[in-house]
Image (spheres, helix red, strand yellow):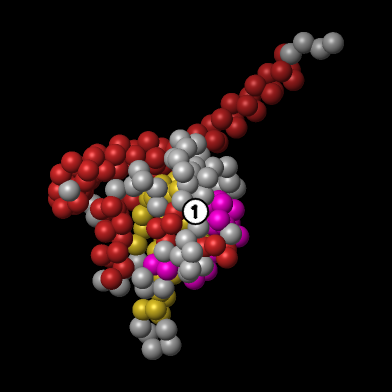
Amino acid sequence: MQTPPIPRQIIDEEVKWDKTKTIVSKTDLYGTILYANDVFTQVCEYSAIELVGEPHNIIRHPDMPKVAFKALWDALKKGENFHAIVKNLTRTGRFYWVITDFTIDKDENGEPCGYTARRKSVPEGVVTKIEPLYKTLLEIEKLKGEKASELYFDAYLKEEVGKTYNEFVVDLFEEESQKEKYQKEENNKSNFKRGLNWFFFGDYE
């Protein structure tokens, strides 16, 4: 099968999409795409026909360190469900950030037969906190190799976070989501007060 064309250049621009929606895809045990929902195709700018049969790394952004995907595959091979924060690449070279919940699909005999990934948009605070870490890991990979990046990543999680990557990702997403929710509520209250001030004290024509 012919692989869809790779973007000629990376554009530092976020793709516009409905961030209330959930991106869903299914793959076999080797990461080959078997199914992509409409949200997935709209966001990544490939059609379902183009995606099916292709490796899932067709949407891998070059800003993502390889060690993050190694952590993912290590967990899935152990039979553990997994979460990851990922910057993905669209067909036109733009990007989108998501938190992905990976679950293991099993056949009628209870044996793993593939994976289902459900992705949701992340608050800006998540990107602000995790992007510098990913940049550091990526630089280590380029200069010192993947093993050095993995060792640094493991030490970072142990010494600075005190959590596994999966726990770190889930907690970061929940914390920043709560902050974003609180900020929106405060903004709504502020807008309401301004509206009342105009109503009671504003000038009338």
**Would you call the spot at circle 1 few (<14 residues within 10 Å), some (14-19), or many (20 or more)?**
few
Q: Is residue 45 shown left or right of residue 99? A: right
Measured as percent of width and height from the top left, residue 7 is found at: 47, 46
27 vs 197, nearest the viewer: 27
* Residue 33 within the segment the image draws in magenta: yes
Q: Which residue is drawn at 38% across and 50% down?
A: 85
Measured as percent of width and height from the top left, residue 12 is found at: 46, 35
- Single out the residue that lies furthest toward the bottom: 109
Q: Which residue is drawn at 36% across and 58% down?
A: 83
Measured as percent of width and height from the top left, residue 140 is found at: 20, 42
Q: Which residue is drawn at 60% across and 47% down?
A: 18
The residue carrying mark 1 is 5
125 vs 49, nearest the viewer: 49
Query: In the structure shown, which secondary structural element does the residue marked by tag 1 occupy?
Result: loop
Measured as percent of width and height from the top left, residue 123 is found at: 46, 42
Going by the numbered disc 1, the residue's amino acid type is Pro
Q: Is residue 51 visible?
A: yes
Q: Give the range drawn in magenta.
A: 31-46
Q: Residue at x 84, y 11 (%)?
A: 205
- Single out the residue that lies furthest toward the right: 205
Q: Is residue 95 visible?
A: no
* Residue 45 within the segment the image draws in magenta: yes
